[in-house]
Image (cartoon, coloured by chain):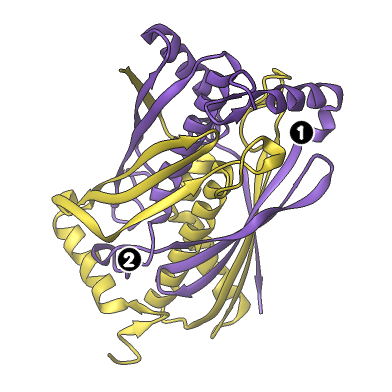
Chain colours: A yellow, B purple
């Protein structure tokens, strides 16, 4: 483990080896991620995250992750977890930050701190069905990123731009994805 | 607490009172949700969910929620949490299920079980920058919902349809939201 191989906690040798492996076998890059959700009571429900598919085979995380979601009391819930729309903001922040660390490592830039605040403005007249002019989702999302590291501001800013340009969640949230819903009743 | 007032764990009297209050004061429905994220190491980072704005004032959850995100080893991480794109699937499942419980309660339908599996297909040639034809985000997302409750299949299915029609996360993920990113460097 040398200063060159591990940067920002990223094993850059493995990162580049992974890139080379996918270049050689593009099919390895096909992944499927999954969440299994179960209703608990009211607006409280829980997802289990464990299995996924990638690099040609079924895989599992090292442990089972359980995520509780709920509404706060002001939205007629019991606050047993973040709201679904807060989880979405977290997903966006997490994707941008993971990308930043990888890209900085690949470019040989040592980061010392990355923090962000993500805010989403929503008018609940949409989901409450009280105003057909108001959309259900966020009207806009704002990300405030603060980066500290061994590099001039323009280098750190260009790493942030590249992270946005290569972020899965940024693409999903800004461009949308087709979603199919199938319903079975017992 | 009568059988009529609490259904599916939803306090329907409070639910209808909230709807009436927002009808009277539409401005109360303006909310802002937030995630504060901090990089830990490599692809591992952590969001704190606590403060939000709604019904005219700053509010907090009953406790601080901390969410760890990471990549699994096969994606050059250390599996300290779900991936950002898995959090997004959870957000979608959680939003649809919370809506289902509320809508069923409002319609007087008792639910006994709601489960869902949400899958997202992604080709990492996009985020790895190896194929400009491939998008960064999911190519498609599929939700398999299974609902059990006191009602004929068509009633349960219509509740699921209404949940989709009023879901904040479904709207965000299918239609997209404008996202601004501001970067500060220290």
Q: Nearer the viewer, residue A88 or B64?
A: B64
Q: Is residue A122 left or right of residue A109?
A: right
Residue A176 visible at all:
no
Q: Nearer the viewer, residue A11 or B57?
A: B57
How far across and down, in percent of the image, does residue A94 sit? 49, 60
How far across and down, in percent of the image, does residue B90 sit? 43, 43
**Circle 1 sits on which residue?**
B29
Q: Is residue B136 left or right of residue A156?
A: left
Q: Secondary structure at mark 1?
A: helix
Few, some or many C-alpha atoms within 10 Å of disc 1 (few <14, some 14-19, many ≥20)? many
Write the residue at 64% across / 38% down: A138
The quadrant in which residue B23 appears is: top right
**Circle 2 sits on which residue?**
B79
Few, some or many C-alpha atoms within 10 Å of disc 2 (few <14, some 14-19, many ≥20)? many
- Residue B151 vertical position relative to residue A158 in the rendered view, above or below: above
Q: Secondary structure at mark 2?
A: loop
Write the residue at 39% across / 82% down: A7
In contact (CB < 8 Å): disc 2 and disc 1: no
Same chain under badges 2 and 1? The reply is: yes
Q: CA distance from mark 2 to mark 1?
A: 38 Å
């Amino acid at each position: 483990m040398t200063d060159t191989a591990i940067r920002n906690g990223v094993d850059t040798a493995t990162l580049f080896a992974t890139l080379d492996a996918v270049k050689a076998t593009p099919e390895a890059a096909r992944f499927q991620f999954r969440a299994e959700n179960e209703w608990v009571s009211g607006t409280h429900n829980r997802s289990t995250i464990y299995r996924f598919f990638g690099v040609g085979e079924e895989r599992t995380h090292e442990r089972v992750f359980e995520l509780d979601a709920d509404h706060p009391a002001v939205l007629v819930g019991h606050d047993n977890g973040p709201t679904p729309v807060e989880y979405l903001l977290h997903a966006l922040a997490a994707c941008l930050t993971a990308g930043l660390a990888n890209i900085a490592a690949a470019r040989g830039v040592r980061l010392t701190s990355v923090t962000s605040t993500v805010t989403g403005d929503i008018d609940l007249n949409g989901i409450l069905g009280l105003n057909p002019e108001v959309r259900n989702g966020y009207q806009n999302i704002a990300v405030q990123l603060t980066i500290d590291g061994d590099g001039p501001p323009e280098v750190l800013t260009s790493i942030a731009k590249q992270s946005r340009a290569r972020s899965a969640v940024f693409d999903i949230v800004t461009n949308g994805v087709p979603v199919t819903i199938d319903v079975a009743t017992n």
